[in-house]
Amino acid sequence: MPAEKTSPQALGLSVAQLKKALTTEQKGVDRELRRLMGQRKGVPLRLLEAMRHSLLGGGKRLRPILALWVWDALQAHRGASGSAASRERVLLAGAGLEMIHTYSLIHDDLPAMDDDILRRGRPTCHVAFDEATAILAGDALQALGFQHLALAGQEQAAELVALVARCVGPAGMVGGQQEDLDAEDLDRPTARLIRSIHLKKTAALLAAACGVGALLGGASPTSVDRLFLAGQELGLAFQGADDLLDVTASTEQLGKSAGKDAAAGKATWVELEGLEAAARRTGRHGQKGLRLLREELPTGAATDRMLALGAFLWNRQQ
């Protein structure tokens, strides 16, 4: 049986080509975020500045791009059931996802949580402003994110909002954060617990992005579910790569404090199994995610680009 193609190059795009495509898409997402974060009537200036500081301060914009590129791939094959939304609506939904993601980062960095001072190469929100303002900025971005998801969804608003809310709620991202905190007190967390933390805290919102692109792309319910599962597997691989980079990369490369996981006693596959075994586990999840994408997306250039991004999520240097 031939080896799986699991690098961007093997999937038909050079790293340079993929990064160029990502940069172009990131610029479009950034323009949309700046548009949405224009001077907002009734919002206290300090709160608005804190929201902008965290939201507009860089980032890979992976969640909006996943939604957009799943949508793009589906448009190459109009056998999907239902009607597809416009790409502008997908971009608006993606901006909502990025706002929700940024809210989670603001809260994750708080002294009561991971207590970090650096995010995306800049001071974290509570350092640049203050702890209370950071909490409020996170709260505001979460609400605003769901507002834009609902507006983008139109007739699918309830389905879209319910999908994302499930992924970031108590049985999703928030629950994963609680499990992550609880695991700091354990002498030796199990691989099963670590998987649960990674699945909820990181993979859930990446999976939601794939689900959003599939829903707005007119995919069938079965295909939406399968693309969501692909996002989960790629999300687990993405977090696995993060854990590896926390040990092997520098603060300058990461744009956040390196070595924080080990110093805080975080439950990671690296801590449990060592670098080599953790890298193999990361690869297994990544390969499964790519297989699911291949099975659900029609053959074509847009799917090749999506597959290259999926591979890049866990074959990266930062």
Image: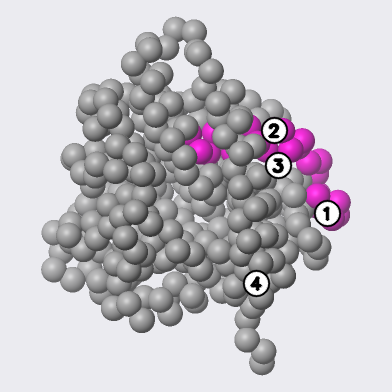
The residue sitting at the bottom extreme is 1
> What's the amino acid at mark 3?
Leu
Q: Which residue is mark 2?
A: 89
Residue 81 coordinates in the image, percent (x, y): 81, 49
Q: Earlier in the sequence, mark 4 or mark 3?
A: 4
Using the numbered discs, state the Cα–Cα distance from disc 2 to disc 4 in whole angstroms: 31 Å
**Kind of residue at disc 2:** Arg
Q: What is the spatial separation of the Cα atoms under label 4 and label 1, in whole angstroms?
A: 22 Å
Residue drawn at point x = 13 percent, y = 68 percent: 187
Q: Residues within 10 Å of mark 4 (few under 14, many from 20)?
A: some
Kind of residue at badge 4: Gln
**Quadrant containing the N terminus in the rendered view:** bottom right
Residue position for label 4: 9
> Badges 4 and 3: C-beta atoms under 8 Å apart?
no
**Sequence-first disc among 2 and 4:** 4
Residue 234 placement, left or right of 308: left
The secondary structure type at the circle numbered 1 is: loop
Badge 2 crowding class, 10 Å Cα cut-off, few under 14, some 14 to 19, many 20 or more, is: some
Q: Does residue 43 sit above or below 170 in this rendering?
A: above
Q: Looking at the rendering, which quadrant does residue 263 occupy?
A: bottom left
Left-right relation of 149 to 140: right
State the residue at coordinates (27%, 49%).
178
Nearer to us: label 2 or label 4: 4
The numbered mark, 4 or 1, whose residue comes first in the sequence reads 4
